[in-house]
Amino acid sequence: MRIRPFKPQDAASMTSWFSDEFTLRRWCAGRFSYPLTQRQLEEYYQQEQQRPDSIAMTALGDDGKPEGHFLLTRIDWAAHTAYLAFVVVEPRLRGKGAGKQMVGLAMDYARRFLGVQKVTLRVFANNPGAVRCYEGLGFRQVSSDPAAYTFDGEAWAGGVMEATL
């Protein structure tokens, strides 16, 4: 796996990674609507690319096809911090270490090329695979909210995790 900056054509692959609204909401907490469309992603990332503190990245497999995605944003150059968001891997790769590999690449990129020393992220408690992935890379929970987000009448607990690079 390798990473490179997000390209608009990556959006076509990403839309197929969310087969239901629950999965989409767990990824974006309402930032996008279901069903996710290429246009939604292209418009959002066109705006993100204008921000000096945000870098959208795509993870590519050995065949050069998108296998994952993440956003490094809220990069604070003076404080050497960044926020990791919109972390997702292709469904067939979930639970097989691809997420851990991709987030590891994201952390390495942030440290080596952006000078980041601490990465923060948010994750829902109903996504235990993601929590284990992040913990395996050194992230620790620093805060929690029992009602961080509500979907379909159900309050989802969530938390903030951070890792020192």
Image (tube, rainbow, N blue to C red):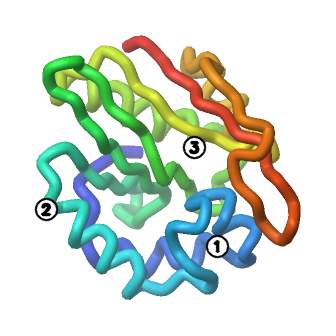
Kindly check if marks 2 and 1 are in contact, taking CB atoms under 8 A apart as contact: no
Looking at the image, which residue is at 60% across and 28% down?
134
Residue 61: name its quadrant: bottom left
- Whole-percent x and y of residue 77? 15, 26
Secondary structure category for the residue under label 1: loop
Say which amino acid is labelled 2: Gln
Quadrant location of the C terminus in the rendered image: top left
- Label 3 environment density (alpha carbons within 10 Å; few <14, some 14–19, many ≥20): many
Lower position in the chain sequence, tag 1 or tag 3: 1
- The residue indicated by pointer 2 is 50
How many numbered circles does the render carry?
3
Secondary structure category for the residue under label 3: helix
Residue 96 seen in the current view: no
- Whole-angstrom CA distance, mark 3 to mark 2, is 29 Å
- Whole-percent x and y of residue 3? 32, 47
Lower position in the chain sequence, tag 2 or tag 1: 1
- The residue indicated by pointer 1 is 18
- Whole-percent x and y of residue 118? 37, 18
Q: Is residue 82 above or below residue 90?
A: above
Report whether 83 appears left or right of 158.
Answer: left
- Label 1 environment density (alpha carbons within 10 Å; few <14, some 14–19, many ≥20): some
- Whole-angstrom CA distance, mark 2 to mark 1, is 26 Å
Q: Is residue 160 above or below residue 154?
A: above
Nearest-to-viewer mark from 3 and 2: 2
Looking at the image, which residue is at 42% across and 64% down?
66
Say which amino acid is labelled 3: Ala
Q: Which label was assigned to residue 98?
A: 3
Looking at the image, which residue is at 40% across and 62% down?
63
